[in-house]
Image (cartoon, coloured by chain):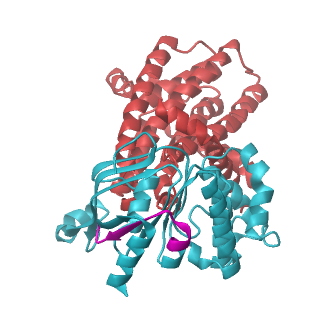
Amino acid sequence: MQKTEQNVIEVKDVVKTFNVFYDKTNTLKEKLLFWKRGKKEIRKVLDNISIYIKKGEVVGLIGTNGSGKSTLLKLMTKIIYPNKGSISVKGKVTSLLELGAGFHADFSGRENIYFNASIFGLTRKEIESRISSIIEFSELSEFIDNPVRTYSSGMYMRLAFSVAINVDADILLIDEILSVGDQHFQQKCFDKLEELKSYGKTIVFVTHSLGQVEQFCSRAVWLDNGIIRMDGNVKDVVNEYKKITV
Amino acid sequence: MNVFKSIYEYRELLKTNVKKEIRGKYKQSFLGILWSFLNPLLQIAVYAIIFPIILKNTQKDYVIFLCVALIPWTYFTTAIVQSMSSIISNSNIIKKVYFPRVIVPLSVVTSGCVNFFISTIIILIFLFVSGMGITQYIIFYPLIALVQFLLLLAISFIVSSVTVYLRDLEHLIGVALQLLFYATPIVYAKETIPENMQNIINLNPMAHIITAYRDIFYYQTAPDVVGLLILLGITIIMCIVGYLLFNVLQKGFAEEL
């Protein structure tokens, strides 16, 4: 795909390696005494990846465990940085990478909405105008003033998702956390994402559910061992993927 | 310039962090926010009892002499100690969510600064109770506080990011701060020590800052304004250098933690 003005996410020739320490030394003493322990293995997680995503595209990232999907998503959010290549993301980004990320266990659900939304760069005023719709969407109004450590993982996810979709971001990056919710809430999430899609938001999400990809995405990218095995039309990619994995 | 824009965009996070730090600090304790006053008061009491015994001739009104220096010094050490562990203690968020990482050291120094402003009330109470009062030179207080803020920010950028890679720094800095305590005219006046030692002490930016506080509150004269402005320039440069280093190191935070 050619580089155009419309690309909101440009991942260009990205290489990402992780140092895997057998036994990590963090202090000077350990480094001096056990200098052999510094042994590490360099693991290439992404190898020369280029993806250009246009505004309004809904991209499903598929691939087996360890293929680099989550790493790619983390790179897009700027939590980690590539060793080579460049990544540019235009517009406001919201990410839902891990369950309970950006939550304080001892704070109440309500306080966490404020905290979480401020991490996404919202001002107090903006949060206040949205808080009722966030709580309503999460269906947690009964528990909203309880500390979130008492929440179940499904409740966590409902709260996190409700905040994320109400941030009004241009780009949503979602890791496979949607699978936590029950059938009813999952459907609700997809309805909401469908709505955001119709507003022209760009969505990238990682999933193991091919059904979700077929139902929801406009494009699928198949990552395999750090390289792009296939990129394009949802049906073609999913069919190819099924051949290999099933 | 981009930094300022992103800090402005994330101002709510900065505010929440500062509030959390100030309120959370004494949340579990019985006396609560009163500790903001009690802590420095008790510290002053300790030094005011011990140092007149050790030193042969202390200054007159030694308690006030101490108090005007010890309170900004406490701000200095507390902010540095908190900065050291700030990135590490926020690791669960840093690993999972993006936000401008500079918010972390910035909120540590800012909350320290707010605490310092509150403790300045202690200085004022001492001044009024002793009958010394305040003079017009107090207008230099914001300038001195600004210089100290920028100095702390620069140090905070460096120690918060380097500690992530080299955890030993925590112990080294603990010792360094202890040394610096004696290399800063807090329990003594700069004039009372040998001249060649004074030259060494002059290299310590905190010495100038503490002296300036002492000038306006205790001696009630004008501080060395030219010196302060030069120091302001130096601290701005330090902040830029510190930020650049922080910015390079922050790219590896999520992986190193």
Range of residues picked out in magenta:
A213-226
Q: Is residue A133 above or below residue A87?
A: below
Q: Residue furthest bottom?
A: A246
Q: In which quadrant will I find the C terminus of chain A?
A: bottom left
Q: Relative to B55, is A178 on the left or the right?
A: right
Residue A210 drawn above or below residue A116: below
Q: Is residue A102 left or right of residue B180?
A: right
Q: Colour of chain B?
A: red
Residue closest to the eye, A27 or B249: B249
Q: Is residue B22 magenta?
A: no
Q: Is residue B122 left or right of residue A58?
A: right
Find residue B6 and report its horizontal and vertical position in percent: 53, 38
In x, y percent, where is residue B148?
52, 30
In the foreground, B127 or A198: A198
User: In the image, what residue occupies the spot 40% across and 54% down?
Assistant: B170
Chain in cyan, by letter, is A
Q: Is residue B5 visible?
A: yes
